[in-house]
Amino acid sequence: MKKYDFIIAGGGMAGLSLAYYLSQSPLSDRSILILDRDSKDRNDRTWCFWERDAGPFESIVFRKWRTVDFHGTTYAGPLDLGDYQYKMLRGIDFYDFMREKLNAHSNIEFQQATINRIKDTPQGGFVIADDEPYIADYVFDSTFALKMNQPEHHNLLQHFRGWVIRTEKPCFDPERPRIMDFRVEQHGDCRFVYVLPFDERTALVEFTLFNDKLLTEEEYENVLRRYIEQHIDTGSIIRGQEWLKEAGPFDQQIDTTTYQISEVETGVIPMTDEPTQENPSEHIVRIGTAGGHTKASTGYTFQRTQRYLRDIVQNLVDTGKPNRNPAWFDQRFKLYDSVFLNVLEKHRHPADDVFTRVYVENPRRVFKFLDEDTRLIEELRLFTTMPWWPFTAAFFDVIRRRWFG
Ligand SMILES: Cc1cc2nc3c(=O)[nH]c(=O)nc-3n(C[C@H](O)[C@H](O)[C@H](O)COP(=O)(O)OP(=O)(O)OC[C@H]3O[C@@H](n4cnc5c(N)ncnc54)[C@H](O)[C@@H]3O)c2cc1C
């Protein structure tokens, strides 16, 4: 059995990013095996994130914006993001970019196989995939499924369904995405739509919920259909019928009158404050969603994973070990996430109003805060814009649940 320096179990966002950072580091000559059951040749997701400067994937960023639109309870209009840009990256562009970069390194192997088992042994991390054994000094695992079953913690889901639509008439402003539009029935949850324009006639329109129960496909689609009818001027029905005849078939054609659906995106992201184990044993490191790299209060994972992976590679270079040791004071952000999840889970205050306050009263501060780059004084300023009683009650409930179960 060949021994690798590193096995990357799961060549998705985190696995491929890790291989990329390793290939750019002084460890670029190490033998790496990337195992994934999927060929990664479909546009299976779109990542959005914010960034101040050009990032490592700048050349494949699909769209980026300095101003975004927001529709909340007391404000509807543009938000200026200051130094930040909101960026959109298509999954397929990321996978293609990675394949091209990583294939240039003969020490990096790809194997399409289903992983059946990952375990630690005294000789290293051991993986069985399609009944073949593999071993390495370290196995980086992004395939582990989070448990999310401890009642003293908060276990919500961010789930969504989105359509890329092409409209009969130009109706999108390519310079203006809508990042949160709460003009949908809330049903006591946090429910919103976002609209990310590709051009004047094409956009990703996605309906997203934060709660603990998935909807049926029909329920998501009814909301999307109604939202488009009410809030996007897609064209006239009579002209639309003629246009549809001319437009011809799209990949996944769903019959509407003034717009066509060319792609469907669905997903479920954990919003949990259950402790995750990034380092479950000596030779195994969990990364990406499996490693707890998702921010519990927002579901955003892409940029955090990049940041954590760069730390892991730097630690490997400096010490030969990958383990990250976050400073204890930085753990306060986990408490903030839990308090926020508690407000949502217990319906302590309407979520649309919480988000309106967060974004509208803190447009410049909010991204820095969500990146966990703020100082305590900035955090306290942001907290003063929140409804104090629901958040205070949530804070004490979090403490009670942690200490008394
Ligand atoms: C549709 C969608 C949209 C998202 N949008 C955003 C966004 O806009 N911004 C953001 O920050 N986050 C977003 N996320 C959350 C998060 O960034 C993504 O889920 C991201 O892909 C997580 O990276 P990962 O490497 O942990 O998991 P993945 O990218 O899912 O990679 C895991 C890999 O492991 C493979 N695998 C799993 N089990 C096995 C097995 N047994 N054998 C072999 N291979 C296996 C899978 O095929 C997959 O390639 C989104 C998630 C989804 C699903």
Image (spheres, rainbow, N blue to C red):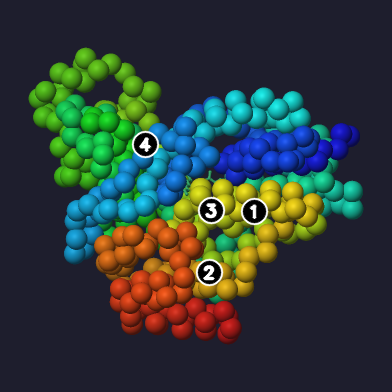
Q: Do the residues labelled 4 and 3 touch (CB within 8 Å)?
A: no
Tag of residue 63: 4
Q: Name the residue under label 1.
A: 311
Task: State which tag comes first along the sequence, 2 or 1.
Answer: 1
Type of residue at label 4? Arg
**Disc 4: residue Cβ within 8 A of ligand 1's nearest atom:** no
Q: Which of marks 2 and 3 is in front?
A: 3
Type of residue at label 3? Arg
Residue 38: image location, x then y, percent: 61, 32
- Mark 1 residue element: helix
Task: State which tag comes first along the sequence, 2 or 3.
Answer: 3
Q: Nearer the viewer, mark 3 or mark 1?
A: 1
Q: Do the residues labelled 2 and 1 touch (CB within 8 Å)?
A: no
Tag of residue 334: 2
- Does residue 193 appear in the picture of this structure? no
Q: Mark 3 points at which residue?
A: 304
- Does residue 92 appear in the picture of this structure? yes
